[in-house]
Image (spheres, helix red, strand yellow):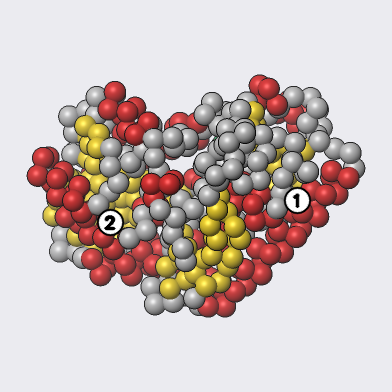
Amino acid sequence: MKFLDLGQQPIANAFLTPGKCETEFFYDLEVGVDLDTSLVSHINFVPPSMMFNDSYVYNTSSSKTMVKHFKSIAKEIKQTFGDLKILEIGSNDGTFIRHFDIDKAVAVEPCGNFAKFTSEMGYNTYNNFWDQKLAVQLAHMFNRFDVIYSANCMCHIQDLDSAFRAIYYALDDNGVFIFEDPSLLEMLERNSYDQIYDEHAHIFSVTALNNILQTIGFEIFRVDKTPIHGGSNRVFAKKKHSIQNPPDGSLDIELEQEDIAGVSEKQTYLDFADRVENSKNSLLELLHEIKDGGNKIISYGATSKSTSVFNYCGIGTDLIDYITDTTPDKQGKLSPGVHIPVVSPEEGFDDSVDYAFLGAWNFLEEITKKESKFLRRGGQFITHVPEARILRGEPISTT
Ligand code: TYD
């Protein structure tokens, strides 16, 4: 059932070189829910090679929060399951895999510029999309894996059934499959519709994952909630017949919470769509009011999420002078769709800025710590999560 239309959207991470914008690709970002499985997905998928290629710009280590997060989960995996043979799907710049020995870890990464990083670090790296052919190839080369880990990648894969079957094939009979992605429940509760953009083909509820994984032969035995990306679920699954890793009860708690929130009910999504529209109207109203008061507004973090917000709301340089971002590959470019210039924080985050819209609201804690000078001199952050407002010193809860 279709429930949301975020309008014409560009590729969220396709930053443009000024003067070369004529060929920009747009698609209609419509979202639906499959009421049988409760899986929330795009109605029209964007071809993967248009999003994940050798010019991909998102690098995990651009935030200290992410570096700490992956160090900590790597340590926990080793402590809980042993320092065993591990496969990472979607290894990006190696922020996670770097904590594992070169002879025990294998990386899969479709973006060539990032596959190069882990390859140069010495890891066996496969510059491929994850699929059944690759699973067979890897199982043949390395035998089956004890742990398969994937962060912010499974929700990118359009054909989930095939991807999960490939993981089942490549996993040892007593192995564990651990993956984490943004949580649907958190998105519904925070009105953070900007989790929806081309790369996020699905926004997972635990309910949907439980339904889908069961049909493949997996059993979820643990679910952790993490504050990453504005609230994610880390799911631990094993093969159904394995007697190792008995369920710890966390799955039932999550399923119950999602049931109470109505993730399997049509009305929940229709209500969410109404809140998204209200969010758009109130954000536009707030930005206009601030701008009309003669203030300079910039955006902090050229994120995929802000691409989604700006294109859905029609926010361009009339309201936001420019975006600051620490990623060198985004600087000097124009943001997708609405073409707001992106500059480095050194160049743009100066005393002339009155207000900064938080494109990276999920890193509020890290950002407010870093930007205490801006706040002390009276600068203010704006957010649209969970509703459009100026942040007057109060934190957005990201836990
Ligand atoms: P993220 O929320 O991970 O992006 P996405 O919505 O694309 O998943 O934000 C990461 C981006 O924000 C990245 O381009 C770096 C930028 N950033 C800053 O510019 N300054 C900061 O202090 C932080 C934490 C991120």
Residue 348: name its quadrant: top right
Indicate the secondary structure of the residue bearing disc 2: helix
Q: Position of residue 376 (x, y in %)?
A: 78, 29
Q: Position of residue 302 (x, y in %)?
A: 60, 38
Question: Which residue carries the number 2 mark?
Answer: 163
Residue 302 visible in the snapshot:
no
Q: Are marks 1 and 2 in contact (CB under 8 Å)?
A: no
Instruction: Report if the beta carbon of the residue with label 2 is closer than 8 angstroms to ligand 1.
Output: no
48, 252: nearer the viewer = 48
Q: Residue at x 39, y 35 (%)?
A: 54
Instruction: Give the mark, 1 or 2, whose residue is nearer the N terminus.
Output: 2
Q: Position of residue 291 (x, y in %)?
A: 84, 43
Q: Is residue 235 left or right of residue 327?
A: left
Up-down relation of residue 38 to residue 287 (above or below): below
Q: Is residue 112 left or right of residue 317?
A: left
The number of numbered badges drawn on the structure is 2
133, 284: nearer the viewer = 133
Identify residue type, mark 1: Arg
Up-down relation of residue 276 to residue 108 (above or below): below
Q: Residue at x 24, y 62 (%)?
A: 218
Indicate the secondary structure of the residue bearing disc 1: strand
Q: Nearer the viewer, mark 1 or mark 2?
A: 2
Residue 386: name its quadrant: bottom right
Q: Position of residue 91 (x, y in %)?
A: 34, 38
Question: Which residue carries the number 1 mark?
Answer: 389
Residue furthest to the front in view is: 22
Instruction: Report if the beta carbon of the residue with label 1 is closer than 8 angstroms to ligand 1.
Output: no
